[in-house]
Image: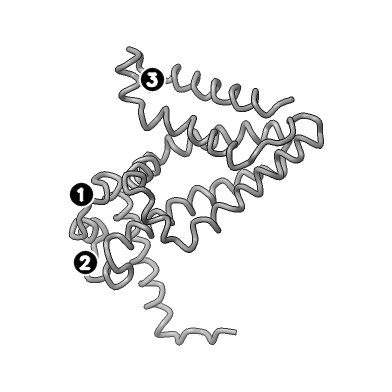
Amino acid sequence: MKAPLPASAEPRSRDADRSQLAILASARDEFAQRGLAGARMDSIAARAGLNKRLIYYYFGSKDDLFLAVLERTYADIREAEQMLHLDEIEPVEAIRRLISFTWHYYLDHPEFITLLNSENLHRATHLKRSDRIQEMNSPLVQLLDTVLERGRRDNLFRAGVDPVQLYISIASLCYFYLSNNDTLSAVFGRDLRAPKAMAQRLSHMTDLVLGYVLR
């Protein structure tokens, strides 16, 4: 069992935690706005109100900081998904809730999309170095697999649905529409961000996914 920190060390530990959280929040905004290449450590430090040397002390290089931001970004959405308690509700409603959650999470966190776009430009070189990314995503896959199995046992869902493929489909239906909204609106001559269009999109995605999983 770890010995408790000396009283004098506890405030320093809390200060360090606060500093690291401030750096991650500032870096997230900087990377989301400017991409990895355009982001500047000076700007991140200024946003956080901290000395730039602290960033290097806690996170090392800009690439290491970018990885830390990506990991925190994935951890945030995975933690929010766990709060849905999909394993405690009826299977069809669980799928509906996951689709709606994913859609609204992307809407409320546009930085999630821009950060992933940036990492895809770099062919996931940062995430491939992560020791945590697969571990933090596996509970979602297991949870979705449990929902699908309950639906199959209740004779609601067809057998053989891969939870990873299903989640990728749900995420991509939401992600593509939002990340390409400007070009899609221009190409089709519609305001695809209008409230009516957004409501239609959520309804369409839900019908599409349920049409696949239902017997």
Q: Position of residue 120 (x, y in %)?
A: 36, 44
6 or 41: nearer the viewer: 41
Residue at 30% across / 69% down in the picture?
A: 60
Return the disc, 3 or 1, that comes first in the chain's sequence.
Answer: 1
- Measuring from the top left, give residue 97's x and y in whole percent: 61, 34
Name the residue beneath numbered marker 3. Answer: 192
Name which residue type carries label 2.
Lys
Tell me the element at label 1: helix
Other residues around mark 3 within 10 Å, as few (<14) / some (14–19) / many (≥20): many
Specify the amino acid type for callout 3.
Leu
Q: Amino acid at mark 1?
A: Gly
Which SS class for mark 3?
loop
Tell me the quarter of the image containing the C terminus.
top right
Furthest-right residue in this view: 154
The residue where tag 2 is placed is 52
Check the image and report above or below for 201 versus 90. above
